[in-house]
Amino acid sequence: MIELYLDTADVEEVKRFDSCLPLKGVTTNPSILAKSKQGLNETLKGMSEAFSTTPRFHAQVVSTDVQGMVEEARQLNEMPYDMVVKVPATEVGLAAIKLMKKEGIQVLATAIYSAQQGFLAALCGADYLAPYVNRIDAMNGNGVEVVADLQLLLDQNQLPAKILAASFKNTQQAMEVMKLGIEAITLPVDVAAQMFAHPAVQPAVDQFDQDWKGAFGDKLSFES
């Protein structure tokens, strides 16, 4: 079953969506945390308490050199949660990923803009790959096509890395990549809400309520 994540640092939104969706966990990045003006420790503590099950958290290193990334990953890996360390899939990041995997640290290669970039990260041992679908589209690329090519490369080479597609503006993008058979996806709160929203839903529900009350008043289903 696909792993479903929320891309947020908002604990209240996590509570909201955990109550109605089978969330695997949460993805964060330095920009999301900076906008929330709340550090990683406080954010993860609040989110851990918000989940009804044990969540998986994806948190990104902010170091810019190989040894700094590796040491930061060690510290993240020792936090009292199910942690996946996010590392940008740059030349420096790939070198760091290779060292992290030697220590058994779970890694997500992030900021992926091309299939070949993600493929190299998978070859270096990354457990998850995060192609930025909408950001690719915004650069006149085709985000869904990049995900399709990357999934094909993983399948052909029998690599265990999971695509965790990220960066979505609408549900159509999310649906298109999920149809490719990816194993994980992270959605911003607004897109997650759109997934079960449709202008025809509430009128249909209202009609059910009107018809029922017209025939049975305030009785419940089992009382009729």
Image (tube, rainbow, N blue to C red):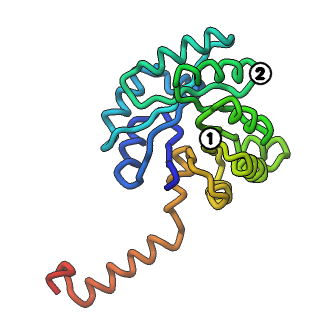
Name the residue type under label 2.
Glu
- Dot 2: element: helix
Contact between marks 1 and 2 (CB within 8 A): the answer is no
Quadrant of the image containing the C terminus? bottom left
Residue 98: x percent and y percent?
A: 65, 22
| Quarter occupied by residue 72 | top right
Q: Nearer the viewer, residue 44 or 90?
A: 90
Q: Is residue 133 above or below residue 68?
A: below
Residue 101: x percent and y percent?
A: 58, 24
Name, please, the residue furthest toward the right.
Answer: 140
**Is 69 left, or right, of 123 in this rendering?**
left
Q: Which residue is mark 1?
A: 161
Name, please, the residue furthest toward the left.
Answer: 223
Residue neighbourhood size for the residue with mark 1, other residues' Cα within 10 Å, grouped as few (<14), some (14–19), many (≥20): many
| Label located before the other in sequence (1 or 2) | 2
Q: Nearer the viewer, mark 1 or mark 2?
A: 1
Q: Which residue is mark 2?
A: 91
Residue 7: x percent and y percent?
A: 53, 39
As measured in the structure, the alpha-carbon distance from the residue carrying label 1 to the one carrying label 2 is: 19 Å
- Can you tell which mark lies on residue 126? none
Residue for point 45% across, 75% down: 203
